[in-house]
């Protein structure tokens, strides 16, 4: 960890806790800042705030008082999920108080170079693949970010011998100033989180921040099949490494005639890859590019690809019971992710879907419903998904209260050889704190089947 002095004796407000807020507050306190934490949850119910109080950090809980902005804070470290339309944040912007997210702190203290991964879909799988390839190649990687391990916690333990592989959301990337990965990846761009960002343009710009500070000594791995991604790449100062699942490239990584190539060098035959789903080929290509740029040999890359079958909550195989196969794709929080999940199977599917209503419809799923024989819905979007299923000609549609009840009902609707797939196409926050909680409940319910 770099011992930086820039925050010593500075008044800093950490707004919103959860894992990243706790880590940021503790780190800043360690770096000599005068830290105040403000979280909406009451102190009596807030174990994180109580632990920070015991460290000697000032804690204000139960509300977000606008009067705090009058106390001379020189910086705000914001929980990524707090909107920039929040009165506290809007007030801080009006006063010219700088606002960052916790990943900026991680970059500032890290002795290790960073590989940063962002995009609408595929981030977690790509991040995990890169980590496993670097590990197999003896590169001492650490994994961090939006994947569940707080980046600034990891950065405190990292040395120059490590490489931090970090998954980054658009929310996190909106709060950076100096953050600069040695290797950045933009997997793809589709509509997502527009309720937070307001417009697609603002969403794309947030994603583009991953390369904002890169130079030509750095690398930016980009999807060559998306014009919008290439427009972002055109504004980057990094060395561009394209990937394509559809055509050969003069340089970069691509798929052609059943083989994957990096700079025209054969890496692996696609029939040997264990990870299911055609959509995962994009993730595999970008991961290979990052691994090759990190001097991982082909043998290590191939070994990972022959054995890696996916990450938890992303097309995760749970079990076979009664000659039915169960898959947990709870991380499918948007329509594209569910389209990809459905496309990964040729068997008849019982689809479990529903969740937070962000105002969109689901008719984009209709062309993908050809092998969906029944739909079980739950959550706020249940009526919309049921309407889509009717339009697609699906005869068997059932509404239940939650995921736990959906599993036995789906089993009753299924036959031998069917796939029972949780792929909600929606965020979980209407009923569950996180998509991980939703997926774990699904897994538990599957194992409870008798």
Image: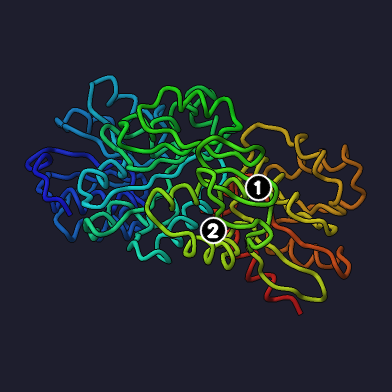
Q: What element carries label 2?
A: helix
Residue 50: x, y in percent? 26, 59
Depth check, front residue: 292 or 380: 292
Whether 96 is drawn above or below 112: the answer is above
Label 1 element class: loop
Direction bottom: furthest residue: 450
Residue 89 visible in the displayed image: yes
Q: In which quarter of the image is the N terminus?
A: bottom left
Mark 1–mark 2 Cα distance, whole angstroms, equals 21 Å
Spot the residue most to the front: 265
- In the drawing, what numbered circle is on residue 245? none
Who's the residue at 34% across and 25% down the image?
90
The relative height of residue 346 versus residue 304 in the rendered view (above or below) is above
What residue is at 19 percent from the left and 44 percent from the top? Answer: 36
Which residue is located at x 53 percent, y 29 percent?
229
Regarding residue 379, the answer to whether it shows in the image is no
**Pointer 1 residue:** 279
Task: Say which quarter of the image contains residue 85.
Answer: top left
Q: In this view, does 5 lie to the left or right of 269?
A: left
Q: Determine the residue positioned at 26% across, 34% down.
A: 178
Give the label on residue 436, or none.
Answer: 2
Q: Where is residue 44 in the image (x, y as percent from the top left)?
A: 32, 58
Q: Where is residue 383 in the image (x, y as percent from the top left)?
A: 77, 41
The one nearer the camera, 174 or 429, is: 174
Mark 2 or mark 1, which is nearer the start of the sequence?
A: 1
């Amino acid at each position: 960890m770099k011992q930086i002095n820039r925050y010593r004796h500075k008044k800093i407000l950490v707004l919103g806790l959860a894992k990243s807020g706790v880590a940021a507050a503790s780190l800043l306190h360690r770096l000599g800042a005068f830290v105040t934490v403000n979280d909406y949850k009451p102190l009596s119910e807030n174990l994180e705030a109580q632990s920070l109080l015991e460290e000697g950090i000032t804690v204000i809980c139960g509300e977000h008082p606008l009067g705090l902005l009058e106390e001379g804070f020189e910086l705000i470290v914001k929980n990524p999920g707090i909107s920039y339309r929040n009165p506290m944040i809007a007030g801080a912007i009006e006063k010219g108080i700088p606002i960052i997210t916790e990943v900026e702190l991680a970059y500032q203290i890290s002795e290790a170079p960073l590989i940063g991964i962002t995009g609408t879909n595929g981030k977690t799988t790509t991040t995990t693949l890169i980590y496993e390839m670097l590990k197999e190649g003896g590169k001492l990687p650490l994994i961090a970010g939006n994947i569940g391990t707080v980046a600034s916690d990891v950065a405190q333990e990292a040395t120059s011998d490590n490489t931090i592989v970090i998954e980054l959301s658009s929310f996190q990337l909106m709060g950076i100033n100096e953050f600069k990965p040695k290797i950045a990846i933009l997997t793809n761009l589709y509509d997502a989180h527009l309720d937070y960002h307001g417009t697609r343009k603002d969403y794309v710009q947030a994603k583009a921040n991953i390369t904002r500070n890169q130079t030509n000594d750095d690398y930016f791995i980009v999807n060559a099949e998306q014009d919008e991604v290439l427009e972002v790449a055109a504004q980057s100062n990094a060395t561009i490494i394209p990937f394509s699942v559809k055509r050969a490239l003069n340089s970069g990584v691509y798929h052609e005639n059943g083989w994957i190539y990096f700079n025209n060098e054969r890496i692996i035959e696609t029939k040997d890859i264990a990870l299911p789903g055609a959509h995962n080929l994009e993730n595999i290509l970008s991961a290979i590019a990052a691994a090759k740029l990190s001097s991982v040999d082909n043998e290590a890359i191939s070994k990972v690809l022959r054995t890696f079958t996916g990450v938890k909550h992303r097309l995760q195989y749970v079990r076979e019971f009664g000659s039915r196969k169960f898959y947990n794709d709870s991380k499918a929080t948007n329509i594209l992710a569910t389209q990809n999940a459905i496309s990964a199977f040729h068997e008849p599917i019982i689809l479990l879907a529903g969740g937070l209503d962000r105002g969109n419809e689901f008719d984009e799923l209709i062309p993908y419903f050809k092998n969906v024989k029944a739909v079980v819905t739950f959550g706020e979007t249940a009526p919309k998904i049921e309407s889509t299923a009717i339009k697609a000609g699906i005869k068997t549609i059932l509404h239940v209260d939650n995921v736990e009840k959906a599993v036995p009902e789906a089993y009753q609707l299924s036959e031998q050889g069917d796939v029972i797939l949780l792929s909600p196409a929606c965020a979980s926050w209407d009923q569950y704190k996180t998509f991980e909680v939703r997926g774990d409940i699904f897994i538990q319910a599957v194992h409870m089947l008798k």
